[in-house]
Image (cartoon, helix red, strand yellow):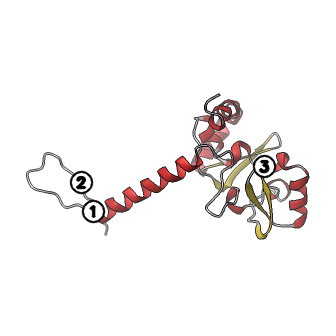
Amino acid sequence: MARRYQLDVGASRPERHNFGVCLRMLAAMAMVFVVWTAEAGAEIRVNNDGYAINGFDPVAYFTAGRPTKGRRTLTATYKGAKYAFVTAENRARFLKNPAKYEPQYGGYCAFGVAYGSKSDIDPEVWEIVDGKLYLLINPGTMSIWKKKKRSYIRTADKAWKSIIQPNK
């Protein structure tokens, strides 16, 4: 059973603390800060391998109606991000009209963008609205998103302009 430690500032005797946990938390927070600052000007969200949508095929959302992991041997680069595809047909479709298939807001969480932030996504939490692909961070966010998605999209459309061009 895991122990919980609590800091009691007014305690008369020193409390035990798991400093290993604290150090790991600080290291994780530092990594998040580095990633956030590195992406501050990024227009397209990519994972550590440089793939957009965590390597999922953007065309498959439209053709197969489900998220499908692309093959690393079948890729295309668009706006500086690498996209992976399931089939050569999907790759050709994408290259013919990338704007039709690319996720909105550079592949960041659409709900987060509506609130002015560039948040991570889960490629398996998605929705196509008016022919556009929107990705979200988790199923809980999706349930909120679905209630007022058109309103969130209008807000995110405006917010995205200031997120990618903060000085304009």
Identify the residue shown where x is 9% and y is 55%. 13
Give the secondary structure at mark 3. Answer: loop
Residue 90 falls in image quadrant: bottom right
Q: Amino acid at mark 1?
A: Phe
The answer to whether mark 3 and mark 1 are in CB contact below 8 A is no
Distance between mark 1 and mark 2 Cα atoms: 12 Å
Kindly report which numbered mark, 2 or 3, lies closer to the viewer in this rendering: 3
Q: Amino acid at mark 3?
A: Glu
Residue beneath disc 1: 19
Of callouts 1 and 2, which one flags the residue occurring earlier in the amino acid sequence?
A: 2
Quarter that holds the N terminus: bottom left
Q: Position of residue 125 (x, y in %)?
A: 66, 53
Distance between mark 2 and mark 3 Cα atoms: 46 Å
Q: Position of residue 49 (x, y in %)?
A: 65, 64
Front residue of this view, candidates 16 and 74: 74
Q: Is residue 50 above or below residue 102?
A: below
Disc 1 residue crowd, few under 14, some 14–19, many 20+, Cα 10 Å: few
Give the secondary structure at mark 2. Answer: loop
Residue beneath disc 3: 102
Of callouts 3 and 1, which one flags the residue occurring earlier in the amino acid sequence?
A: 1
Does residue 23 appear left or right of residue 77 in this picture? left
**Residue farthest to the top, as pictured:** 168
Identify the residue shown where x is 47% and y is 50%. 33
Of callouts 2 and 3, which one flags the residue occurring earlier in the amino acid sequence?
A: 2
Distance between mark 3 and mark 1 Cα atoms: 44 Å
Residue beneath disc 2: 6
